[in-house]
Image (cartoon, grey):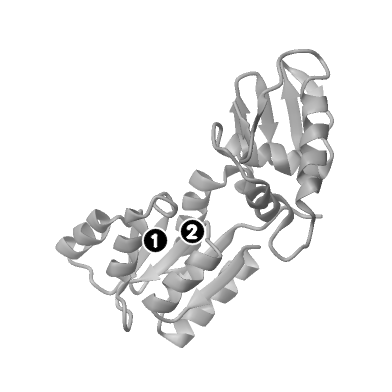
C-alpha cells in the first residue's frame, strides 16, 4: 500500500490554466483537487485539508487575498503553505500578498517548471518524507529516499506501514496525531481501514524501535491518539 500522496489544491477561475496545473501536478505524483472560486475553495479545504494551496489572487465571489487571510487566522490552517498567483507584478502587490500570509508569490505568466519547483519547496517544509528528505529525532534516523531506518546507528527493519507511520511522526515531533488523522496520512482517504488497525501498527512500530533497548519514544495520549516525544 503506497503512502498517502501529498495533496495539492489549485484555486484558479481560468479553466485552461486550472487544467494545465492539475495535469502537471498529477504527473508529479500528487493528489490534486481544484476549485474555481474562493467560496468553493474554503468549503473544500474544510472537508479535505490540502498540504499546499496554489491560489490565484483574482477570483470571483471571494478573492484569493481574502481566502488567504481567512486561512491564516485559523489555527487549523495557519501553517498550510499558500503559493499566491497573480498578474500583479508591482512590488506593493507582492508585499501585500506576503503580508496577508502567502508563503510564496508567483507573477503571471510563469513557467510551469518553476511553479512545480516552488510547490516542491513548500512540500519539503510540511511533508519532508515525500520528497526524499532525511529525517532525524534524537537517536532515530529515517532516510525517506532509501527507506532505511536506524536507532543509535543500529539498523531497524520496518514494514512499509510502520515506515510510513514513523515518517509521519518524525515530520512533526510533539504533534498529537488522532487515529483518524493517521489513517488519512498513512493509509489515504480513499481506503477504509478500522481505527483499531492504527493501534496494531503503532504497537509493531514500538516493538521495533525498542528492540535494541532505549526508551519508547512514542507517547499515548489518552482520548486523543499518539505523539513522538
Residue with the most extreme left position: 92
Q: Residues within 10 Å of mark 2 (few under 14, many from 20)?
A: many
The residue drawn where x is 72% and y is 43% is: 164
Q: Secondary structure at mark 2?
A: strand
The residue drawn where x is 40% and y is 83% is: 13
Q: Using the image, determine if residue 141 lies above or below residue 15.
A: above
- Give percent across and percent down for residue 61: 31, 82
Could you tell which of marks 1 and 2 lies nearer the N-terminus?
Answer: 2
159 or 104, which is in the foreground?
Answer: 159
**Mark 1 touching mark 2, by CB under 8 A?**
yes
Residue with the most extreme bottom position: 15
83 or 221, which is in the foreground?
Answer: 221
Q: Using the image, determine if residue 4 lies above or below residue 202.
A: below
Residue 66: which numbered mark, if any?
A: none
Q: Residues within 10 Å of mark 1 (few under 14, many from 20)?
A: many
Instruction: Please indicate, yes or no, whether residue 212 appears anywhere in the rendered image.
Output: yes
Q: Using the image, determine if residue 23 lies above or below residue 60.
A: above
Label 1, label 2: how far apart the Cα atoms are:
8 Å
- Give percent across and percent down for residue 187: 74, 54
Q: Residue under label 2, please give it.
A: 52
Q: Residue under label 1, please give it.
A: 83
- Within the image, what quadrant is residue 204 found in? top right
State the quadrant of the N terminus: bottom right
Q: Secondary structure at mark 1?
A: strand
Amino acid at each position: 500500500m503506497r503512502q498517502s500522496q501529498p495533496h495539492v489544491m489549485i484555486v484558479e477561475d481560468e479553466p485552461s490554466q486550472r487544467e494545465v496545473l492539475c495535469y502537471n501536478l498529477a504527473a508529479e505524483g500528487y493528489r490534486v483537487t481544484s476549485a474555481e472560486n474562493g467560496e468553493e475553495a474554503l468549503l473544500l479545504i474544510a472537508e479535505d485539508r490540502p498540504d499546499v494551496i496554489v491560489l490565484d489572487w483574482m477570483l470571483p465571489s471571494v478573492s484569493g487575498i481574502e481566502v488567504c487571510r481567512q486561512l491564516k487566522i485559523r489555527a487549523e490552517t495557519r501553517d498550510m503553505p499558500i503559493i499566491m498567483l497573480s498578474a500583479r507584478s508591482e512590488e506593493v502587490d507582492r508585499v501585500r500578498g506576503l503580508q496577508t500570509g502567502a508563503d510564496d508569490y508567483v507573477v503571471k505568466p510563469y513557467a510551469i517548471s518553476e511553479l512545480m519547483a516552488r510547490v516542491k519547496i513548500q512540500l519539503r517544509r510540511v511533508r519532508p518524507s515525500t520528497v526524499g528528505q532525511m529525517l532525524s529525532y534524537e537517536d532515530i534516523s529515517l532516510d525517506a529516499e532509501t527507506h532505511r531506518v536506524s536507532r543509535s546507528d543500529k539498523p531497524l527493519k520496518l514494514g512499509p506501514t510502520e515506515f510510513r507511520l514513523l515518517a509521519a511522526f518524525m515530520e512533526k515531533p510533539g504533534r498529537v496525531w488522532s487515529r483518524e488523522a493517521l489513517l488519512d496520512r498513512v493509509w489515504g482517504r480513499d481506503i477504509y481501514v478500522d481505527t483499531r488497525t492504527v493501534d496494531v501498527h503503532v504497537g509493531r512500530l514500538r516493538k521495533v524501535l525498542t528492540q535494541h533497548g532505549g526508551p519508547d519514544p512514542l507517547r499515548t495520549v489518552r482520548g486523543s491518539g499518539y505523539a513522538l516525544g
